[in-house]
């Protein structure tokens, strides 16, 4: 039996109730993400057609363009769950995902030999780090599979035996759920290389590293087992490398830039950023304070994920997952080096009364955060403008804010077509995305965009740059406005109202759907 496995019981065994609590903490934040509307709509389309759709039917700026839908299985799952169980079904699905992530992370940290208390602290830090990213989107499966792969690798290091073949079906399934499967391949590549370095330094040869390299190649081949084949790879590469979408989409902005803007504006999230930075810093410091050659592969993976988080805020959750093992391992080593020689045995299980209290606290947290509520907050969407369009039976083309694309498609398709939605590189040509940026930023080319893609309506937020432009644009009339959205009509458009009457209102309360 390995050293790690004899030092301390797994938190899964010591207190299963605590695992539920940590999952509830990770799942505590829930709202209608801008992509949720589209994901369910596109999944319903797959269900209705009994197959995938490979062209874009929702947009007038890129009609019929190829649609590289690398997350079709996630959308199918979201649509099926919502269709059968509604909003509560979606919430329970997300909680199950959070629980799966927590279980995998618990398996990882248990291999390090950390005490239950340190395992608990580490898992709580990871839960708080990934919590803001735990929304109703395909990235949930990235978090699950990354946690699962790291659990297998931790067992491979500390027990020298693990069913690593399981990685192959994981990668095949992952490539159908989301393009984040590239993270899994990167993790395998780093682990294989670093494991080779460690084995050479310990004069153990390259046999195991070569087997890992073979596993990497087979896993990469397994990711081609999807409807798009190699196109899935090119879709992901285009998303990651396209500088236009990285500039427009908030998820792709660098961590330090987002932190700076958040602190300047006084927005919520400063505590979350502080937790993220502290967790990263403690992981790095603890490793160098108690270095172990054997731990280098997992630490290298953690460092790669930390670097990815600084490059793009959407990777913060991946870093929170990757640091769990090294943080528990080297935190344990540091504490052990400062502890007295007398070893106090750790009980194998928490007392039933303690677990009962944790269960009650967990249920209270679930209820307080709305896990069992039929409502899902979706503020920030143009619900009032959509109601106005539907009330007046308006039809036509809408030049819209990109984050609202899925919302508009959900409520207005096929009577209205949008200019753009959150699929960006998966559907829209670079020219269309760049022209949207020109208009959205109110550049001197905004008028060219209106001529190049003549819309019947423009739907924008009143606090954006393009609102000021549209308010002074000849030939356009404001039809509706509230504190969330303003709807402008092209004068003389065949799709418009005969005699538009501007309506000004307070944005209505609205809950998904």
Image (cartoon, rainbow, N blue to C red):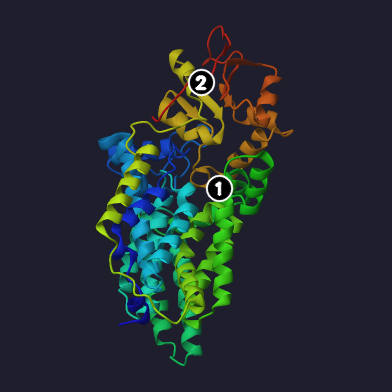
Image: 400 above or below 506 = below
Residue placed at 32% from the left, 75% from the top? 162
Left or right: residue 36 compared with residue 467: left
Label 1, residues with CA under 10 Å away: few <14, some 14-19, many ≥20: some
Left or right: residue 347 compared with residue 316: left
Image: 15 above or below 88 = below
User: Of 434 and 124, which appears nearest the observer?
Assistant: 124
Q: Quadrant of residue 399?
A: top right
Residue 228: horizontal and vertical position, in percent? 39, 54
Residue 381 seen in render: yes
Mark 2, secondary structure of its residue: helix
Mark 2 sits on what residue? 385
Numbered marks: total: 2
Lower sequence index among marks 1 and 2: 1
Residue placed at 43% from the left, 51% from the top? 139
In the drawing, what numbered circle is on residue 251? Answer: 1
* Quarter of the image with the N terminus in it: bottom left
Left or right: residue 137 compared with residue 86: right
Residue placed at 69% from the left, 42% from the top? 264
* Quarter of the image with the C terminus in it: top left
Looking at this rendering, what residue extends furthest in the bottom direction? 203
User: Of 223 and 115, which appears nearest the observer?
Assistant: 115
Residue 229: horizontal and vertical position, in percent? 39, 58
Residue placed at 30% from the left, 73% from the top? 163
Mark 1, secondary structure of its residue: helix
User: Of 240 and 315, which appears nearest the observer?
Assistant: 315
Label 2, residues with CA under 10 Å away: few <14, some 14-19, many ≥20: many
Residue 190 seen in render: no
Residue 250: horizontal and vertical position, in percent? 58, 44
Image: 66 above or below 333 = above
Q: CA distance from mark 1 to mark 2?
A: 26 Å
Residue 494: horizontal and vertical position, in percent? 53, 14
């Amino acid at each position: 039996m390995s050293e790690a496995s004899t030092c301390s019981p797994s938190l899964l065994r010591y207190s299963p109730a605590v695992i539920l609590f940590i999952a509830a903490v990770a799942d505590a934040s829930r709202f209608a993400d801008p992509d949720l509307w589209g994901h369910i709509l596109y999944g319903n389309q797959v269900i209705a057609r009994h197959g995938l759709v490979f062209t874009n039917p929702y947009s007038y700026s890129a009609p019929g363009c190829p649609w590289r839908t690398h997350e079709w299985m996630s959308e199918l799952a979201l649509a099926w769950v919502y269709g059968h169980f509604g909003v509560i079904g979606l919430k329970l699905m997300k909680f199950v995902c959070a629980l799966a992530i927590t279980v995998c992370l618990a398996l990882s940290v248990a291999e390090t030999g950390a005490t239950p208390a340190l395992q608990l602290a580490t898992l709580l830090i990871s839960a708080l780090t990934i919590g803001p990213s735990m929304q109703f989107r395909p990235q949930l499966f990235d978090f699950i599979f990354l946690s699962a792969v790291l659990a297998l690798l931790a067992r491979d290091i500390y027990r020298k035996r693990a069913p690593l073949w399981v990685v192959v079906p994981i990668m095949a399934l992952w490539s159908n759920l989301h393009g984040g499967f590239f993270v899994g391949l990167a993790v395998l590549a780093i682990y294989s290389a670093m494991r080779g370095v460690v084995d050479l330094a310990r004069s153990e040869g390259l046999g195991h590293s070569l087997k890992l390299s073979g596993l990497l190649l087979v896993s990469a081949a397994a990711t081609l087992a999807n409807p798009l084949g190699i196109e899935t790879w090119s879709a992901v590469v285009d998303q990651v490398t396209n500088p236009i979408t990285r500039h427009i989409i908030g998820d792709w902005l660098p961590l330090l830039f987002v932190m700076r803007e958040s602190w300047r504006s006084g927005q919520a999230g400063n505590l979350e950023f502080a937790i993220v930075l502290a967790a990263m810093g403690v992981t790095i410091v603890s490793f160098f304070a108690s270095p172990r050659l054997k731990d280098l592969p997992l630490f290298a993976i953690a460092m790669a994920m930390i670097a990815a988080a600084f490059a793009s805020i959407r990777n913060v959750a991946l870093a929170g997952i990757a640091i769990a093992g090294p943080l528990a391992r080297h935190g344990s080593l540091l504490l052990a080096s400062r502890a007295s020689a007398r070893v106090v045995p750790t009980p194998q299980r928490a007392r039933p009364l303690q677990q009962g209290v944790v269960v009650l606290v967990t249920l209270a947290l679930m209820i307080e955060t709305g896990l069992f509520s039929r409502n899902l907050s979706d503020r920030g969407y143009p619900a009032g403008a959509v109601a106005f369009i539907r009330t007046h039976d308006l039809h036509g083309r809408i030049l819209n804010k990109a984050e609202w694309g899925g919302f508009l498609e959900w409520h207005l398709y096929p009577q209205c077509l949008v200019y753009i939605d959150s699929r960006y590189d998966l559907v829209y040509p670079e020219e269309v995305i760049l022209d949207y940026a020109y208009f959205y930023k109110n550049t001197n080319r905004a008028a060219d965009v209106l001529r190049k893609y003549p819309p019947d309506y423009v739907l924008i937020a009143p606090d954006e740059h393009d609102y000021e432009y549209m308010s002074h644009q000849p030939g356009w009339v404001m039809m509706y406005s509230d504190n969330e959205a303003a709807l402008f009509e092209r004068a003389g458009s065949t799709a418009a109202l005969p005699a538009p009457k501007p309506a000004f209102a307070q944005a209505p309360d609205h809950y998904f759907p």
